[in-house]
Each structure stands twice: as C-alpha cells, then as structure tokens.
Image (cartoon, rainbow, N blue to C red):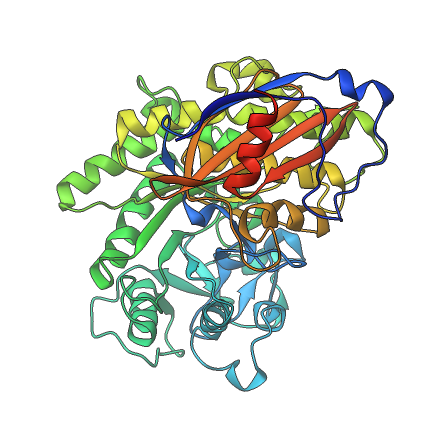
Amino acid sequence: MIKRKFSVFMAFTLLTGTLAIPYIPSNAANLNINVSIDTTQDKTPISQLIYGGNWNFNDASLTSKRLGGNRMTGYNWENNFSSAGSDWQHSSDTFLLSDGNVPKEQWSQPASVITTFHDRNQSENIPYSLVTLQAAGYVSADSKGTVSEAETAPSARWKEVKFNKDSALSLTPDTTDDYVYMDELVNFLTNKYGSASTPTSIKAYAIDNEPALWPHTHVRIHPDQPTCSEILNKNIELSKAVKKIDPAAEVFGAVLYGFAAYSSFQSAPDWENVKGNYNWFLDYYLHNMKKASDIEGKRLLDVLDLHWYPEAQGGGLRITNNDTTNIECNKARLQAPRTLWDKTYKEDSWIAQWFSQFLPLLPNIKNSIDTYYPGTKLAFTEYSYGADNHITGGIAQADVLGIFGKYGVYAANIWGGGSYTASGFNLYTNYDGKGSKFGDTSVKSDTSDVTNSSVYASIVGSSDNKLHIIVMILIYFYYLYVSFMSLSKVYYALSKSD
C-alpha cells in the first residue's frame, strides 16, 4: 500500500521524444505543486474501451473501434451503398467500400463494409467492434450519385428500413424488394461471427448516428425534425430487434451529437409537451428506456452514447479549431478537459454562460443515469479537443483519457487523430513501445493546483505491487510529462521528498 504526499518541483522526464518542450523558464524551479496518491481509496475499474477510435491513426494503440459517422445513417447493408448527405452533395455512392478498403471482389457481398471492418479489427487484436444500425427510415438504393430534392424519400433512390422482417431471415438478402431489415443484418453478422458473448464476435450496436441533426445532415432521408417520442420509440423497437437475435450484444443509444441534443433534443417539436419535471432530454430518454425495459423484462439500453466536441473558446476561436497559431486558443484547449469534472472551472462558451447548471458534465450525466436508469454505462463515441498534430492537442488528449478512467466512463472513440494525440493514447496503452500499459484500476490521486497540473494513478487489479502515475504540469503554458511506470521508480520519487 502506498499512501504518500509529495511535491513536484520540476518535470524531469519525458515519456516520448515527440512531446518536446520548447524551453524551461528560469523560474520554473519555483513551481511547487503538491500531489497525493492513496492506493487504498477511490478504487475504480478503468474500462479498457475508453482507448478507442473511429479509425486507425499514426501509431496509436487502440482497444476498440466504431463503425459510425454520418455515412452510416444511409448505409444499405444489402448492397453496401451509402449516402453522404449534406457532407457531399447528398451523394449515394460506393464511398464506404473504397474508404474502408473493401477488396473489390467483395463489394457485392452483403455487409462487406461491416465484415471488412470487423475482420481488420480482429487481425489487429482490437477486441471490441461497435457497429451502427440504421434507424432514420431509409437507406441508399443505388450508387448513382447526387439525390435531388425531388427524389427525397420515399422515392426510387431509397429503400425503406424495417427493424423486423416478420418472416424467415435469410443470409442472402433480397436486393430486389423495397425493404432493408435490421434484424436480418444482426442475424447475418451473428451467424458469421457468433454471439456477442464469444471472442470473435461483434460486441455492440449503436442506434444510428446524431438523430437530432437528421434534417440537416440527411434532409433527403428525414427532412422533418424528429420528435422526442419518435427517437425514443425507434430506440426501443430497434433495441428489441437486436436483443431478439443476440441477447448478449450491447446496445448504444441515443448517439446524441452535442449539448443542444442533450438538453432539449435540438428543441424538438414535442419537447415542451414531454419535458414535465425532467431537467433535460437525457432524463426523459433514460427514464423512458427504463420503463420500456421493465415492460420487456430485459435491459434495452446498455450504454448511453453521447458525442462531445467542446464549445470552449480562447482568443475568439473554438478549441476544436486546428489553427494552433492562436496562443489563447491553445491555452483554452489545455484547460477545457476540466469542464468534464471540475465544478470550480467555467470555460468561455455558450454552454457555461447559459447552461452552467449542467456543468461539470460528467457528474450531471452520472446523476441522470443513477436517478433514471441505474446501471447504464456511459460512452463518448465521438469527441475531439482539436490540434491532433500539436502538443496542446496531445496534452489535452492525455488529460481526457485520464479523466475518462478516473470517473468511470465505459467507452470512448476519438474522432480524428494525429501524431500528438497518438502519443496521448500510447501514454496509457503502449508507453514503452512494447505493449506496456497504464493500470486497470484507478486510485485516489489529487493535486493542489488543478489549473497548472493533472495527476492520474492506477494499480493492476486489486494489488498495489505496481503503481502507475501520470503527472502533467503546466509551466508558462507548456506541459511536461512526468511518468513513472514501475513501483520502484515511483517509490524513489516519493521517498526523495520525505
């Protein structure tokens, strides 16, 4: 057991050569930050799924991957065509096949976008695949390019999505009819890979992508603003279809794009009618998913799936902007992770200005889960703090991963990635280039200066024979990593200040 306090006077070792420090000011030695570690307190399992991505990037060592994004809303698993929506001329085409490097001979095979994705994960020893299912109502019928406004669904350019086939499920779907079935897709994948309880299987399914934005992103598929009741009913019914085929599969919902969706489902037409005493849409969604689960006699929502692109600004720029010449924005990026947990921090954003009662974010979301659907896990399947190829992006990434582990987030998948964010990942998943990892149990770690430093500590399992500590220190808005990855080194650092 280690229960010590120590002072960090100077950062004196770097984890990776890529995270170089431009200079160390002469007065840095005067910096005195007290850090305390207690391996007997606040033990929290660190889910290994927080170190996930939406695609591979640089040399980042990932533990999970998601097949999601705007393209997946209009994806037709029977023919592998998909719609770009407003991202690119409302084009229905073969982009997912080419972008996913699906072998040409497999382009006509059912669900080959998904199977190639999952097969690649398996070959790369990424054990957890999260696959998006379609719920907006229609998917691409062809790959003929731009869909005009006059061809908005329903039209010949689209196939209608049905959650249940209500007849025999086939491993060779009928591409000549007008429908695409979700239970048939899950059955196809389960038949190929086994139940989610088996090692080679697809583990989880997400219920579409960012539904509050469908009228903007996919106006040819779903031109009308969705209601709270519509998205709730679709989540319930699609989850039931999944659980019918593979009871072991985890269901992720409602895949909300950001705070405006968390709060009122993008000011949904029926929000004021259903709001009642709920603080925000998350309460309504969780409570009604719980009610439906009780009726069904099984859990229908395993993971509350949110996206988080911080609105924090600095120097007039949002931190997700990649213009790293703006020093004030860089400074704001380094502080922005505090919005996840620190009640003393107020970022420069419209959220903090007008909706501060919902910040810090993680405690408020956790409170909603505990109140309305206890046991539901939390995921951020898209998030980014910007500047993937800049040191501030790497530091923010490392800080966020530490927070996710410390506060019990179940899964997370970065949207983006670059050389510095890869280093932020590898600090936890492959810090020596030989597969060595941060521990899997978070323990109590505190710093006396949350503005200028962060600290995360972990042990392996229940034993504190090996302690990992990550300390990040801000010196004149430059960070240094202090990383001790074995008990002997940690003990030496601690005893030096005794």
Question: Is 361 on the left or on the right of 492, as rendered?
Answer: left
Q: Is residue 321 in view?
A: no
Q: Is residue 313 in view?
A: yes
Q: Position of residue 278 (x, y in %)?
A: 33, 20
Q: Position of residue 42 (x, y in %)?
A: 37, 27
Is residue 66 or residue 43 the one in the foreground? 43
Q: Which residue sits at x=29%, y=57%?
A: 249
Q: Where is residue 486 in the image (x, y as percent from the top left)?
A: 53, 43
Q: Which residue sits at x=59%, y=55%?
A: 85
Q: Which residue sits at x=52%, y=27%?
A: 340
**Which residue extends farthest bottom?**
105
Q: How many circles with numbers are drawn on the protein?
A: 0
Q: In which quarter of the image is residue 348?
A: top right
Question: Is 473 on the left or on the right of 183, as rendered?
Answer: right
Is residue 120 or residue 405 the one in the foreground? 405
Q: In this view, does 136 lie above or below 186?
A: above
Is residue 80 or residue 324 the one in the foreground? 324
Q: Quadrant of residue 129?
A: bottom left
Q: Is residue 136 above or below residue 285?
A: below
